[in-house]
Image (cartoon, rainbow, N blue to C red):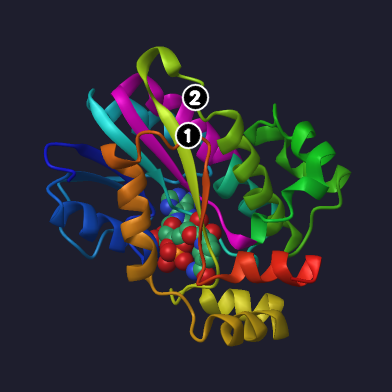
Amino acid sequence: MLQGKTLLITGVSSGMGEETARVVKAQGAKVIGVDLNPPRIQVDQFIRADLSSKAAIDELAARLPDGINGLANIAGLPPTRPAAQVVLVNLVGLKYLTHQVVPKLADNASIVNLASLAGAGWVDSIPVIRDSEALDFDGVDVFCKKHGIEGARSYFFTKEALIVWTMQNRWTWRDRGIRMNSVSPGPVETPILKDFVETLGARVEEDMRVMDRPGRTTDIAPVVAFLLSDGSGWLRGTNLAADGGMHSYIISQRHGF
Ligand SMILES: NC(=O)c1ccc[n+]([C@@H]2O[C@H](COP(=O)([O-])OP(=O)(O)OC[C@H]3O[C@@H](n4cnc5c(N)ncnc54)[C@H](O)[C@@H]3O)[C@@H](O)[C@H]2O)c1
């Protein structure tokens, strides 16, 4: 299904990025992996890069070949990390990397962003999201202070903004047929699940009850692979909830269904 495609995957050395690399390779794709840490699985090319750094992203982009068929933005930091760092990696670096990679993409390429159920409340954050549209690496500290983004809020905010950015850019590069979508998992068993439990406590426990079990990387990677494949070609700007029904549950509760 992904035979002959070259895919760039960030966050390839752990969790959902690692599993996505495994799944797309099994479907015949070549993988260029990016991460701070070395990968534990065999990829076709690995480029170490710190995605919170503009200079590192420039260096990374310069090393990429032309003709990449898909970009999966999976690297991310959990809510336990310092707020400015979370905003840098999960939003500012992700957007900048994407813009730097677009010239290296083949026509009809697919871009997939790993958002989260944590971003589901984006509709209540529109003014802050708008203010982040031109946010650059240097402005993150001031931006966080200005909007009171501290602690776990940083994580929620970055995922809200990412879902909106994905909708906005569903078809920005239409002259080259390049589309963008996102995937929003609920809690997933990866090394950072403990960070979510630490931050959100009872809420994550409640999520587990609703879902019967936490998600697994093997629940999410095939969804990312689908969005990278031509079979999802008519999906643009879609945020796929891959969350064991959590999002539907929340909506149903809110509206009394
Ligand atoms: N685990 C969950 O419950 C959950 C739920 C919803 C969404 N997500 C999102 O899914 C994505 C993947 O998360 P995961 O659970 O697989 O986490 P993980 O910690 O297992 O993997 C994240 C990877 O990103 C890399 N990374 C972090 N900062 C980086 C940086 N500055 N530069 C380069 N690489 C960097 C890490 O080294 C790691 O390999 C994240 O964006 C996360 O926000 C996770």
Q: Tag 1, which secondary structure?
A: loop
Magenta highlight on residue 95 = yes
- Coordinates of residue 179 in the picture (x, y in percent): 42, 30
Residue drawn 52% across the image and 76% down it: 193
Locate residue 137, reporting x and y percent.
Answer: 63, 35
Q: Amino acid at mark 1?
A: Arg
Mark closest to the chain's N terminus, 2 or 1: 2
Residue at left offset 79%, top offset 67%: 254
Seen at 53% across and 36% down, the residue is: 237
* SS category of the residue bearing label 2: loop
Q: CA distance from mark 2 to mark 1?
A: 7 Å
Residue, disc 2: 171
- Above or below, 221 against 31 in this view is below
Q: Are marks 2 and 1 in contact (CB under 8 Å)?
A: yes
Q: Quadrant of residue 252?
A: bottom right
Give the extent of the magenta segment: 92-117
State the residue position of label 1: 236
Q: Is residue 113 above or below residue 190?
A: above
- Neighbour tally class for label 1: few under 14, some 14-19, many 20 plus, Cα within 10 Å: many
Q: Is residue 247 left or right of residue 125?
A: left
